[in-house]
Amino acid sequence: MRFNADHTGRLQEDEGVKTGEGRATFGAKEQRELEDALAAMTAEELRSFLLDAVDRLDEEPRVELLDFLVVRAATGASGWKPASPPAGTVDKVKEFVAAARRLGCAEPSEADAYLRVGTRAFLAGDVETAHAILESLLLPMADAEIDLGQHEMVDEVLTVDIHGCAAQYVMSVYVTTPLDRRAEAVHLAMKAVRGITSFWSPLEQLEQIAAVPLPDLDHFLPLWLRYLEEQPSSEGEWESDLDRWLREAALRLEGVAGLERIARKSKKPETLRTWCDALAELGDWPAALRACDDAAEMLGASHWRGDFLDGAALAARQLGRSDAVDRLEAAWLAAPSLVRLLRWLGADTQQSDEMNRDTIVERARKAIKECPAKSGSQLGLLYVLTGNAQAAADILANAPGLGWSNEGHPGRVLFPEFAGLLVEGTTATLAPKVYAELRKRWWDPACLLAEHENNQEVPQKLTVPSILELIVRAVPGEGIEPQGRLAMFKAMQTAAARRLEGVLENKHRRSYGHAAILIACCLELSPVIGERDSVANWIDGLRRECSRFKAFQRELETALGSITEA
């Protein structure tokens, strides 16, 4: 096992136990050792080990482990089931609930114990008893008639899996209700426990809790679909639980054609998205292209329209169509965002350096005319790429001190951009904390079929170049005159001072470090621009003005200590 020391002095393992939020998790080596040890033990040895291990646990983890073990055994291939509750248990539960309702509260340990009896009844196959117990307990909990001492959700004070209990309750309703009334009963049951849990894909969730195919599913599914289609849809573009359940049922019964049918009928963005995604997952790119185009047309001027134009651009790219780049431009025009702008500006610029630069600059000049004035990050980037340093500097200098985390704030883009351009062609270096912003690849969760950095299940995606990659290709620094460089630097000073003023006035202590890094960066760049003495005096003035903010003073000292002046 090898260890590496990172910059904070902590030890990190290349292979082995990894540390997380205050707990250790198995690494690859430990996982292999665990699997090998379990494989080497006989069944009797494993049983003995487990009993010994359980004895060493505290009460809460012991009970949770037992619950997990019982579920795994009851749904396994052996056919074992736990014992059904004794006669009279349902009456005891109802007496407990009645008393809790009168008082308005109950001990969580008692509720825990009775819920566990209900889950055992379900696993034992005694569905009627499970139905009665779980319904008696869950409904008043969901309606907040019984307070168990929780701050928000009841699972804060319970050791039993309350979400699993709710799913078992709905499953017991499914099993005990005649087929002709089952659809409505299942809907009402899920609605009744909504205060405890939510059902995103109820058919899938019920199958998971049952560990077997749902009984009579072939007969139930068309009744369920018909019932859901008869229910009123939610208003506007946002979908309700019923809308999601309808999508699941239509896909199960009719496949992608069912999704298309309800998508064209409802014109709801999420249903349209599911339809388009399903075609993309099938690799049917001609159909996906038509679906995305139709969805964008159906949504009109909605802000969702850009998502489907993204999808159409991806489909066009997969099909090798010549209009793929034009479709990226159309997506940005329909719903301007930084990630869409980066996609379009950097599309198909992997040719010669001169062609890269000309293409990017031409697109940037075209985009300036259409870019929303409120999006300082996009407009500032466009001015930089076209060499208009003064216009970009004005945008940064006029930016507010707060809101740097918002996409439209120019600081998150222009400050590191300016820093990189000012050291270009010099021997100066930049502190990694500042320049790292340029290397980020922007991800917009609202973009259909967009780049998912951590999702390996998305085989086809639209890639997003980093800002740094675009600057390297466009080489805007070559056309910036000394006056423009000075304007950029002064804008950085103004932005840093305004950032400091904003975080101190509003006591945003978590942002003290960010403001300090910006100030330190200005000092780091000052020799490059010939402003070393004036910036040092500026920082001394800031120190005096902020002398009572001791936490910020510490952050500033740390930031100043991390830079290397040119």
Image (cartoon, rainbow, N blue to C red):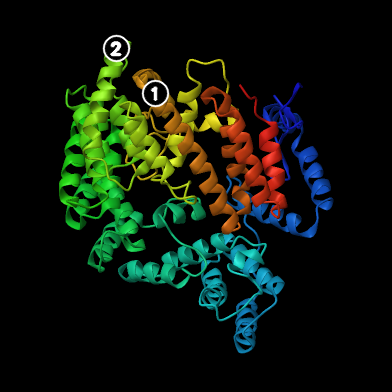
Residue 282 against residue 507 in the figure, above or below: above
Crowding at dot 1, Cα within 10 Å, few <14 / some 14-19 / many 20+, comes out as many
Q: Which amino acid is tagged 2?
A: Glu
Q: Position of residue 465 (x, y in %)?
A: 38, 27
Crowding at dot 2, Cα within 10 Å, few <14 / some 14-19 / many 20+, comes out as few
SS for callout 1: helix
Residue found at the far top of this picture: 352
Q: Position of residue 384 (x, y in %)?
A: 36, 29
Q: Quadrant of the N terminus?
A: top right
Q: Residue at x 64, y 76 (%)?
A: 89
Of the numbered discs in the image, which one, if any, rests on residue 471?
A: 1
Of the numbered discs in the image, which one, if any, rests on residue 7?
A: none
Of the numbered discs in the image, which one, if any, rests on residue 354?
A: 2
| 110 left or right, relative to 409 | right
Q: Nearer the viewer, residue 133 or 463?
A: 463
Q: Nearer the viewer, residue 83 or 435?
A: 435
| 121 left or right, relative to 549 | left
